[in-house]
Image (cartoon, helix red, strand yellow):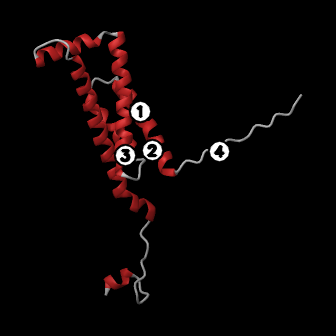
């Protein structure tokens, strides 16, 4: 028997990228769960939760958009293939545009609506964390020393 030595694989990922991937996965999972609830407007909640994990507004928006977009895209493709939902989309588009064959426009509009709600939720979540992060990093109120080595609270009392 030969002794096989397995090399340990080390993946170096920056913390911001790691947080983005985690927030994307969490957003996708919560979006998948909330997709089966009849109130589709709740789709903003996964974006908010996903945005909380990111330090920048851009990554928060991206995590919300990608999480909602991918889940809704697969869900709609599944529904069109299993339940023949494209016929309904095509008929609805026929009522709006006056002819059949425009179901793909409604399909894209539904996806854009999901993208909009995911982006809005991601922006809200990351914006809240940008506002609250300094308070979390400080922990508790610290005494700030001024130039004459007296605390600012003592200067306020005088």
Give the labeled residue for mark 2.
20
Mark 2–mark 1 Cα distance, whole angstroms, equals 12 Å
Give the labeled residue for mark 1.
28
Of label 4 and label 3, which has the lower sequence position? 4
Q: Residue at x 76, y 37 (%)?
A: 6
The disc label shown at residue 136, or none = none
Question: Is the C terminus in the top left, top right, bottom left or bottom right quadrant?
Answer: bottom left
Q: Residues within 10 Å of mark 1 (few under 14, many from 20)?
A: many
Q: Residue at x 35, y 25 (%)?
A: 73
Of label 2 and label 1, which has the lower sequence position? 2
Say if 77 sits above or below 133 in the image.
above
The disc label shown at residue 60, or none = 3
Q: Residue at x 36, y 57 (%)?
A: 132
Of label 4 and label 1, which has the lower sequence position? 4
* Disc 4 versus disc 2: nearer the observer: 4
Element under label 4?
Answer: loop
Which residue in the rendered view is the most extreme toward the right?
1
**Residue 12 pos. (x, y %):** 59, 48
* Disc 4 versus disc 3: nearer the observer: 4
Report how many numbered discs are placed on residues in the image.
Answer: 4
The disc label shown at residue 10, or none = 4
> Is the residue under label 1 in contact with that under label 3 (CB below 8 Å)?
no
Of label 4 and label 2, which has the lower sequence position? 4
Of label 3 and label 1, which has the lower sequence position? 1
Instruction: Determine which quarter of the picture holds residue 103.
Output: top left
Q: Residue at x 27, y 36 (%)?
A: 117
Q: Residues within 10 Å of mark 2 (few under 14, many from 20)?
A: many
Say if 2 sits above or below 47 in the image.
above
């Amino acid at each position: 028997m030969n002794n096989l030595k397995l090399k340990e694989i080390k993946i170096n990922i920056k913390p911001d990228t790691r947080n983005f991937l985690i927030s994307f996965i969490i957003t996708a999972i919560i979006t998948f769960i909330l997709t089966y609830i009849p109130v589709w407007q709740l789709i903003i909640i996964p974006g908010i939760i996903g945005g909380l994990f990111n330090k920048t507004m851009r990554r928060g928006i991206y995590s919300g958009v990608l999480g909602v977009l991918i889940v809704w895209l697969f869900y709609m493709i599944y529904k069109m293939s299993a339940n023949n939902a494209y016929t309904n989309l095509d008929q609805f588009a026929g009522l709006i545009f006056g002819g059949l064959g425009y179901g793909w426009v409604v399909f894209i509009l539904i996806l854009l609506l999901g993208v909009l709600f995911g982006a809005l939720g991601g922006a809200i979540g990351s914006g809240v964390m940008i506002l609250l992060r300094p308070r979390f990093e400080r922990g508790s109120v610290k005494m700030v020393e001024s130039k004459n080595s007296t605390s600012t609270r003592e200067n306020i009392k005088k």
